[in-house]
Structure formats: structure tokens, C-alpha cells
Image (cartoon, rainbow, N blue to C red):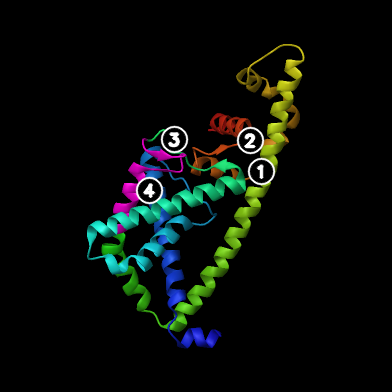
């Protein structure tokens, strides 16, 4: 099978390499956007490495499915907007289902759908997709097709092995983060429960008393590794349906340490 792939048209491999390249370019865009807002480098990727798979998948779908419409700019823009919006919505929904968390939130933007997508950003993605398909993709395609099938095959092997490891380590890291958030949330709820036994207090006041349990369970914060802390910088609008208080406490702690 390997020899067949090397010696024949490796269309699937080339599409995968498109995905890799656009995932990297998407990461560069996110980092540049974050730099203009924060004034310093932030790894905005979901993975450890410099890749944003949602960009790679979205643009690859655009260049594969919509190439026949590139001579009709209006139709290309409309279909690009619909496809990228659908992908962003489905991705947001799946992340919420799997991790009980909202990784981005357009609730404050007009014409949004459940905070997962909004009209203004959908238009931006549509315009960006048209520009990529017409201006950037011809260059990427030329570079990819300049390599022999054998070289492309080995590039494919290297990158797919890398992504398997990166995805695996990322999922493991997120599972560990969920466990830590659960413990911290339980500690926070314990404060409220004990406080209500003597006096009715608000959750805000309970947060002030968290320092008491932090002195006792400070190791919970110490178990947060660099990647865990990076998530809170990469996704500043991260919200959890189960661990909202825990996330707020961690964000406050990160601010104190800066």
C-alpha cells in the first residue's frame, strides 16, 4: 500500500498537507491578532504546537469543495461564509459537549447563535476564505506539487505522527485539568456550605474566603502545569458549565502572579 501511495497520485496526502499548512498559518494569524490586543506573545493554539486545526480543516474544505466556484465571487463568498460558520458552530458545540466548557463566546456580539457564531465574524471568515482561495492557495499548491510523491509521502508520515502525539498529549492535559478544576470547585462549594451554616453569604464573599482553603490545599494550584495555564491565556473567554467558580479563581490567581 505504501508503494502504491508513493508511486501514484497521492491526492489525499496533498490534502492533508494543505491542512497542516493552513493550520500553521491559522495559528500565525491568531498569535498576531493576540499580539495586537495584548502586546505580547500568546500561544493561541488548542494544541501544544503551532497549529490551529479548525483553520486547517476549514480552509482545506474551502479549497477542495469551492474551487469550481472561484470565478463567481459572490457565490464563493456566500458558500465560504456558510461553510466556515457551520464548522465553527459544530466545533464549538462539540467542545462544549466533550469538555463542558465554552471556549469562545460571541454572546455580546449582535446576531449571534448561542454564542458559538456571529454575523460579523462569519463575514470576516467568508472574506478571508475568498482571499485565501484566490491569492494564497495557488502559491501553496505550487509549492506542494513541486515535491515528488515520495517526498510528500514522508512529509505526510512525519506530520501525522506528530499530530497523533500532540493531540494525545493535549487530551491528557485537558483531562488532568478537568480533575484539578473539579477539586478546586469542590473546595469552593465547601466554603459556601460551611458558611451557610452560620450566615448567609454571597458567592463573591465566599471567593474572598477561598484563601483559607488555599493555604490548606495550595498544592491544587501547584499541580497546574504550563499548558494548563496557557489555556487560560489562549482562551480568555473560556467558561465552564461545571467549574465556573474554579476557573474564575484560577484566572484571579494568574493575575496576582503577573
Mark 2 residue crowding within 10 angstroms, few (<14) / some (14–19) / many (20+): many
Q: Which residue is mark 1?
A: 178
Region rendered in magenta: 110-130
Is residue 166 visible from the viewing direction of this image?
yes
Q: Earlier in the sequence, mark 3 or mark 4?
A: 4
Circle 4 is placed at which residue position?
32
Tell me where residue 10 appears, x and y as whole percent: 45, 80
Q: Which residue is mark 2?
A: 243
Q: Earlier in the sequence, mark 1 or mark 4?
A: 4
Relative height, residue 207 to residue 36 (above, below): above
The residue depicted at 70 percent of the width and 43 percent of the height is: 179
Do the CB atoms of the residues marked 2 and 1 lie less than 8 Å apart?
yes
Residue 51 visible, this angle: no
- Report the residue at 41% width, 83% height from top: 148
Tag 3 secondary structure: loop
Q: Report crowding for label 4: few under 14, some 14 to 19, many 20 or more residues within 10 A (C-alpha).
A: some
Separation of residues labelled 2 and 1 (CA atoms): 9 Å
Q: Residue at x 34, y 51 (%)?
A: 125
Magenta highlight on residue 195: no
Q: Is residue 163 left or right of residue 220?
A: left
Gap between marks 3 and 4 measured at Cα: 24 Å
Give the distance between the C-alpha atoms of the residues marked 1 and 4, in whole angstroms: 29 Å
Amino acid at each position: 500500500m505504501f508503494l502504491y501511495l508513493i508511486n501514484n497520485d497521492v491526492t489525499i496526502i496533498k490534502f492533508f498537507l494543505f491542512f497542516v499548512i493552513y493550520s500553521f498559518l491559522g495559528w500565525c494569524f491568531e498569535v498576531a491578532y493576540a499580539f495586537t490586543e495584548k502586546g505580547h506573545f500568546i500561544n493561541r493554539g488548542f494544541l501544544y504546537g503551532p497549529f490551529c486545526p479548525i483553520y486547517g480543516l476549514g480552509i482545506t474544505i474551502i479549497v477542495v469543495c469551492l474551487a469550481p466556484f472561484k470565478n463567481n465571487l459572490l457565490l464563493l463568498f456566500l458558500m465560504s461564509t456558510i461553510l466556515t460558520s457551520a464548522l465553527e458552530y459544530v466545533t464549538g458545540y462539540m467542545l462544549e459537549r466533550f469538555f463542558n466548557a465554552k471556549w469562545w463566546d460571541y454572546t455580546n456580539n449582535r446576531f449571534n447563535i448561542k454564542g458559538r457564531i456571529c454575523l460579523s465574524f462569519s463575514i470576516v471568515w467568508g472574506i478571508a476564505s475568498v482571499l485565501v482561495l484566490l491569492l494564497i492557495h495557488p502559491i501553496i499548491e505550487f509549492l506542494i506539487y513541486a515535491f515528488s510523491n515520495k517526498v510528500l509521502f514522508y512529509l505526510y508520515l512525519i506530520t501525522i505522527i506528530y499530530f497523533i502525539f500532540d493531540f494525545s498529549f493535549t487530551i491528557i492535559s485537558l483531562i488532568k485539568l478537568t480533575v484539578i478544576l473539579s477539586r478546586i470547585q469542590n473546595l469552593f462549594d465547601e466554603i459556601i456550605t460551611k458558611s451557610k451554616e452560620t450566615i448567609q453569604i454571597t458567592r463573591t464573599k465566599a471567593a474572598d474566603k477561598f484563601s483559607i482553603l488555599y493555604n490548606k490545599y495550595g498544592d491544587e494550584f501547584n499541580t497546574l502545569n504550563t499548558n494548563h495555564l496557557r489555556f487560560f491565556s489562549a482562551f480568555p473567554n473560556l467558561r465552564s458549565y461545571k467549574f465556573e467558580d474554579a476557573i474564575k479563581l484560577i484566572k484571579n490567581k494568574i493575575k496576582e502572579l503577573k
